[in-house]
Image: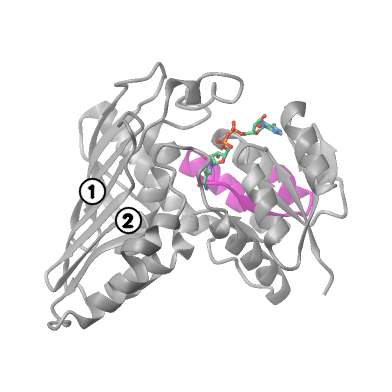
Amino acid sequence: MSDIGFGVIGLGMGKHHCMAIDKAPGARLAGVCDVDEERLSPVAEQYGCRAHTDYSTLLEDDDIQVVNIATPSGSHAAIGAAAAAAGKHLIVEKPVDITPARIELLIGAVQRSGVKAAGIFQSRFDPLNNRIRVAVQEGRLGRLIGVHGHLPWYRKQSYYDGPHGAWKGTWDMDGGGSCMNQGVHTVDLLQWLAGPVKGVMAMFGVFAHDIEAEDQTVALLRFENGALGTLYTTTCCFPGYDQRVTLYGSEGSITKDEGLLNSWRLESDPEREEEQEMLTLFGGERYNHKASGAADPMAVSFDGHTQIVVDMIAAIAEDRQPVITLDSARHAVEIIDAIYESGRSGREITIG
Ligand SMILES: NC(=O)c1ccc[n+]([C@@H]2O[C@H](COP(=O)([O-])OP(=O)(O)OC[C@H]3O[C@@H](n4cnc5c(N)ncnc54)[C@H](O)[C@@H]3O)[C@@H](O)[C@H]2O)c1
């Protein structure tokens, strides 16, 4: 099988996509695009691929079968629909776009063109998260009672300033701030682990930056399975701490900080042998080598992105859906939309 040609649009986070494509067996970076030539030229030179300042010329390149979209979040659906109409398969950065309605439009365009489309929530490929999900699905935590996600991150004002900062923390291009941009991974992880959310109550505001939308959000979550939860996202919290996820159940509880497992306490494991095994695999030392975005927006491991590229190649070869479908990536945006609506109205918002 010959290599699949990839094109990357948007070269901030898109540079991680280039590394991921370079690393993935069976993938070849054929073209890159950015409206900023200072970002474009070095990347095109580094990988020896074609450079485009306009994504429509990249979409005309027959050597490109898959397009990775890593432009500002509020532009994903429009660029994705154009790419799908050009017959390209898609890998779309998180969030797929900033409203459920736009995500629906993109899903429609993908269906009409018959191409494959994947969202990016790299946490779903994390081995520890997968072990937790299996434990929840097998009922090993008993009845889920509490599902909590905290993201006490830190971003300097300079992150929001400058040529590539102006869209961040805005309603029309970022769809919000700490919750939609940074927190969407945590929101998706909670719903992926614990199931859909049917109601939210929230407060948000701007606390420590000169931005439009919000840099701190607190929300109560009502899950379809009856569990209650809390969500906390911020970019104000110096020096920036890792994401914390806690699941409490009637027969077991699991707590972790990003990729570091803190506890795995199950009633079915009275001798705590399983917990020891899990802590050996996912606790302590092992964690010190992992990248964290707590204080550095670019400190994101590209391994998850590599797996998403590899999965897309397999999806094309096997003519199946990618693991992270756009449909499955939509609920996180539905939840965040409801969080903002609740924050504005002061009411509990029901989803769906
Ligand atoms: N998966 C992750 O962990 C992760 C991490 C960071 C960012 N992201 C996502 O990646 C996307 C980009 O974020 P970022 O932080 O890299 O932003 P950024 O502003 O640094 O980069 C976006 C790039 O897109 C370019 N661009 C804008 N409009 C364009 C157009 N029409 N055609 C071509 N290029 C265009 C800009 O010039 C810029 O270089 C966002 O959706 C963000 O949510 C994901």
Residue at image point 77% right, 42% down: 32
For the record, the magenta segment spans 81-109
- Near-viewer residue (249 or 43): 43
157 left or right, relative to 316: left
Residue 141: quarter of image: bottom left
Residue at image point 53% right, 29% down: 173
In contact (CB < 8 Å): disc 1 and disc 2? yes
Residue 237: quarter of image: top left
Hey, which residue is sitting farthest front in the picture?
A: 285
Residue 190: image tag: 2
**Residue kind at label 1, given as amino acid type:** Leu
**Residue kind at label 2, given as amino acid type:** Leu
Q: Secondary structure at mark 2?
A: helix
- Near-viewer residue (11 or 311): 11
Seen in the picture, residue 263 relative to 339 is either above or below; the reply is: below
Ranked by sequence position, the earlier of labels 1 and 2 is 2
Residue 102 sits inside the magenta stretch: yes
Q: Position of residue 209 (x, y in %)?
A: 37, 19
Q: Secondary structure at mark 1?
A: strand
